[in-house]
Image (cartoon, grey):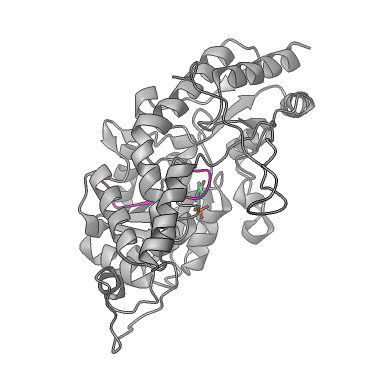
Amino acid sequence: FLASATRRRPMRPPDGGAGGEPPETDMSMRLSRSIVGEAEAEAVHRVICEDGYLGIGREVQQFEADVAAYLGVPASWVISVNTGTAALHLAVEAVLGHGSGAEVLVPSLTFVASFQAIGGAGAVPVACDARLDTATIDLADAERRLTPRTKAIMPVHYASNPVDLDGVYAFAEKHGLRVIEDAAHAFGCLYKGRKIGSFGDVACFSFDGIKNITCGEGGCLVAFEAEAAHLASDARLLSVENDAQKRFAGARSWDPDVKRQGWRYHMSNIMAAIGRVQLSRLEAEFIPARRALAARYAEKLASVPGVALLHTDPQDFIVPHIMPVRILHGRKDEVKDALAARNLPTGVHYKPNHLLSCFNTGQSLPVTEQLYAELVTLPMHPGLTTEDVDAICEGVAQALAR
Ligand SMILES: *Cc1c(COP(=O)(O)O)cnc(C)c1O
């Protein structure tokens, strides 16, 4: 697949706008990027020029039906929203209520979105340590942080690996907790052969520009309980009762009731149109490309001294969204600098949340801090070629051979 893939480099927008000079091609490699083109543009054109209704309407309803069909769940369980963060926020409120003050166990090593969503719902994020082998939540550490106020756990499928999801659900059952999966990295992934978002309590996906599929921005939650799904569906439209269902039917209620706090978090028809095309490309195009790149990285880096790959779920179960690797012996910065000198970008996923002023309680999470000192994220997106990966791996190996 990759050997025959043509180099698709991002275009810089033309300075003069429509009708101006053709865009220059930017040859620099990107850490991650949207893979969108004519088909997505045509879908947006159709919504704007043929339909003319841009807000939440039939296209959004159809996107939810498409996602539900893909996951194998009823359409009413899939609630689309404008970001993955909004999905997490609504999920926390759907299971704990708004302003619960409850504590939610969450790994510190995650995008700040997970923490802000918990806080935004009026709950309290409790930062937990990570496992060194997978960078996912350490349940033994989480257990030590339980209090009578702990009501939920938010596992993060870091680098698209759900890892011990059975263990998370067993832990939750034992301690009477709800589970809110931050599956932002994991759209298209399987756990023990079942799709993430097809079982469980609540799962949240992100469709921001660089995730496994994109709507431009966007996200959705999948709630496996009618009451939670209904609460979230209303809450995304200011908690106006049944407003989404009415808008899907092209109608509105001018005499609604509102019983609780709500938000303007709904998805637009424009976003949904992009998402529907992206979803149609996922299995044939994006999944094999991402898996092939990850396999190539693993093959090239497995034997490089000083590099430790994270333990991943079986290759054919995961759709890698990012490619973080551990650089041992305090040599992370050397590797980053050496790659930068070759114009090869690297990233950091993530600065741990317990080190951010907003969430710093003075605690130390030793494994998370070790991972933060070691993890380097290498480029990962379907626009890369095998040669790109080889060049990156060569750069890593040479930096460490010095
Ligand atoms: C992207 C992401 C989110 C939030 O999604 P947005 O769509 O960007 O709001 C949440 N958690 C993790 C781990 C993410 O990577």
Q: Position of residue 104 (x, y in %)?
A: 45, 57
Q: Position of residue 215 (x, y in %)?
A: 45, 51
Q: Which residues are magenta?
A: 199-211
| Residue 203 highlighted magenta (yes or no) | yes
| Residue 225 highlighted magenta (yes or no) | no
Residue drawn at the location 49% of the way across and 23% of the way down: 294
Q: Quadrant of residue 392?
A: top right
Judging depth in this view, the residue of 62 and 43 nearest the camera is 43
Question: In terms of secondary structure, what is the magenta stretch mainly?
Answer: loop
Q: Quadrant of residue 365?
A: top right
Reply above or below: 178 against 250.
above
In the rendered image, is residue 188 in sight? no
- The quarter of the picture where the C terminus appears is top right
Image check: 401 left or right of 349? right
Reply above or below: 74 against 185.
below
Residue drawn at the location 54% of the way across and 60% of the way down: 116
Judging depth in this view, the residue of 158 and 286 nearest the camera is 286
In the rendered image, is residue 388 in sight? yes
Q: Quadrant of residue 323?
A: top right
Residue drawn at the location 28% of the way across and 63% of the way down: 229
Reply above or below: 205 against 259.
above
Q: Position of residue 371 (x, y in %)?
A: 61, 34
Residue drawn at the location 39% of the way across and 37% of the way down: 162
